[in-house]
Image (cartoon, grey):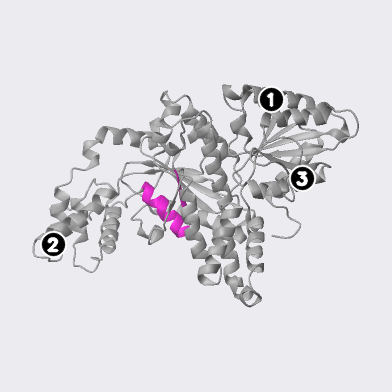
Amino acid sequence: MTDNVKTKSQLIADDVRALLRARTPLIWIVTREEQRVERYLVEAAAAAGYIPRAWDCGQGVTDAISGKPLQVGTPDPLGMFAYIIERATAIGQGERVAWIMRDLPAWITGPAFIRELRTLRNAVRVLPTAVKDKAQAIIILATTGDVPPELQAHATVIQWPLPDRGEITAILDAAIEALPDELKEGAAPNGRRDAAIDAAVGLSGEEAASTYAKSLVQFRRIDPAAVTGEKKSIIAKTKTLEWFDPLPGGLDAVGGLVPLKGWLTKRKLAFTPAARAYGLPRPNGALFVGVSGCGKSYTAKATATAWGVPLIRLDLGALKGKFVGQSEGNLREAIGIIDALGPCVVWLDELEKSLAGATQGAADGGVSADALGAILSWMQERKGEAFIVATSNDVSALPPELLRKGRFDEIWFVDTPTASEIAEIVKATLKTHDRDGLPIDVAKVTKACEGFTGAEIAAIVPAAMFEAFADGGREITTADLVQAAGTVVPLTKTAAEKIASLRAWAAGRARPASAPEAEKPAKARGRAIDL
C-alpha cells in the first residue's frame, strides 16, 4: 500500500468531517472499538473546526485528546443534553464543540428514560440553528445500529469498519518499533512480514496489537501461524462465525466431481496479482445443490484448503437474537468481519433451513425475512474478497431471488456418484484409513455400492475394519467391504421420490458436478453371410 492511499477508517473520518461541516446534529457510530475510533473522530472534529470533547456517565466531560476531566457539564445525561442546548443558544461568544458520547444508548431506551430521549430530541432540533461560532454536534458511540425510532429522522448512522490492511500494517510497525533495537530486525523479516499482516486482517485494532504482542513475548518475533491461531479463537467469540481448520488433501481428497473441481481451480487464479492486473473480475461464489451426503460440504472445506485461505462458516441460525434489531446487528457484525478478512471461503451450510422463516411464514417476527434481505444486499453489493459456498439439500425451499444470476457465479447439482466416482471414493477412503496398500478388488466393491451416496460409500471402510478387528485383528478384505455394503439401505431407496424431484429440477437449471460416464463401445459383430 502506498502512502497516498487512505485506509477505510480515514475515508470514513473524511465523511464525518463533511457531516460536521454540514452541521449534522447527531451522528451515530456503530463500533466495538471505542478507543481506536475516537482517535479518528478527534482528528475529524478538529479538521472541521470543532473542539473535540468526550462524555461518559462515569467521568462526565473530559478532554477528548488528553483524557483530562473538565469542570463543565454533568455525568447525568439529562443534564448534559440541557447543557449542550444552553451552549448552542446562549448569548455572546461561544465554542464549536463536537461531543463524543459513550454509553448513551442505555440512557435513551425504554419508558424509564423518556425524559432523556425527549431532551435529546429537543437538542438535535436546536443544534442546526445555532450560529457558526456556537455550533454543537453530538456523536454517539454504540455497539449496534439500533437507533430509537424517535431519533431515526435526525441521526446519520455510520458502521465503522474494522482495520484494513493499511491500518494493520501501521499496528505491526508500532509493535516492532517498541522493541529493543537488537530485536527489531528479526521481529518480522521480509519473508514473514506480509504473512503476519494477512494473518491479523479481520481483527480489531486492539486484538491485532494484542496478538502481535503475545507472539513477540513467546517467540521474540511475529509468527504468522501464532497470530492466525489467536484470530481463530477471537472469531469464535462472535458466536455467528466458526473457523475451520484446513482439510488435509484439499480438492485431491474429494472423489469424483471433476467438472466442479476444475471450475474451482480456475476461480482460484482470480485472487492472484496477475489476475488483478489483467482485470479479471472477482468471483462471487457458488451454490451446491443436491443429494445429501454426496460431498457438498466436503467440497466447500476442500476449496479453502486448495486455495490456501481461511474457511469461515457463517451460522445464520445463530444470528437470531431475542431483542428487536439484534439479529440484524449480529449479521452486520459478521459481514464486517468477513469483508475485513480478505480472501477467504465463507460456507453457508444447509441454506434452506437457515432461511426457512423467510419463505415458509415462520412466526419469528420477520427476522428470517430481514436476514434474507440483508444477505441478498450483501451478496450483490459487497466489495470484499470472500468467496461464498452455499449448500442446499432442498432447493424448492430456497427463495427465487437467491437463485438468480449475479448472486452466485454458478449453481452446481451434486448427484449420487457415478461408477467411476464410486471407485475414486473407495480408493480415497482406503487411503484415509491407511489401507490403500491392500489387495482390494475395487471394481467388485464399486458394483456393491451402486446407487450409494458418497457418505454411505465412505462408511463401509470403517464398518469393515470393525468386523476384521473383531475377527482376530486381521486386515480387511474385498469380502468384508462387500458385506458391509450389503447392510446399507441407500438414501436413493428411502428418499427415492425426493431425489427424483431434485433431479427433475436440476435438469436445465444447474450444471452437473459429475462428468457423464463414458459409454461402453458396442460389442463387435462378425459379418453376416449366407450359408
Residue marked by disc 1: 153
Q: Which residues, given as a range, are shown in magenta? A: 296-314
Can residue 235 be seen in the rendering of this structure? Answer: yes
User: Which one is in front in this view, the residue at disc 2 or the one at disc 3?
Assistant: 3
Crowding near the residue tagged with mark 3, few <14, some 14–19, many ≥20 C-alpha atoms within 10 Å: many
Q: Is residue 58 magenta?
A: no
Residue 344 spot, x, y in % from top left: 51, 53
In-front residue for pair 42/325 = 42
Residue marked by disc 2: 469
Vertical relation: 185 (above or below) 108: below
Mark positioned earlier in the residue sequence (2 or 1): 1
The amino acid type found where label 3 is placed reads Ala
Q: Is residue 317 left or right of residue 338?
A: left
Q: Residue at x 47, y 57 (%)?
A: 265
The amino acid type found where label 1 is placed reads Ala
Q: Residue at x 54, y 58 (%)?
A: 269
Residue 44 spot, x, y in % from top left: 77, 45
Which quadrant holds residue 94? Answer: top right
Residue marked by disc 3: 44
Mark positioned earlier in the residue sequence (2 or 3): 3
Vertical relation: 59 (above or below) 478: above
Q: Is residue 133 left or right of residue 189?
A: right
Q: Secondary structure at mark 1?
A: loop
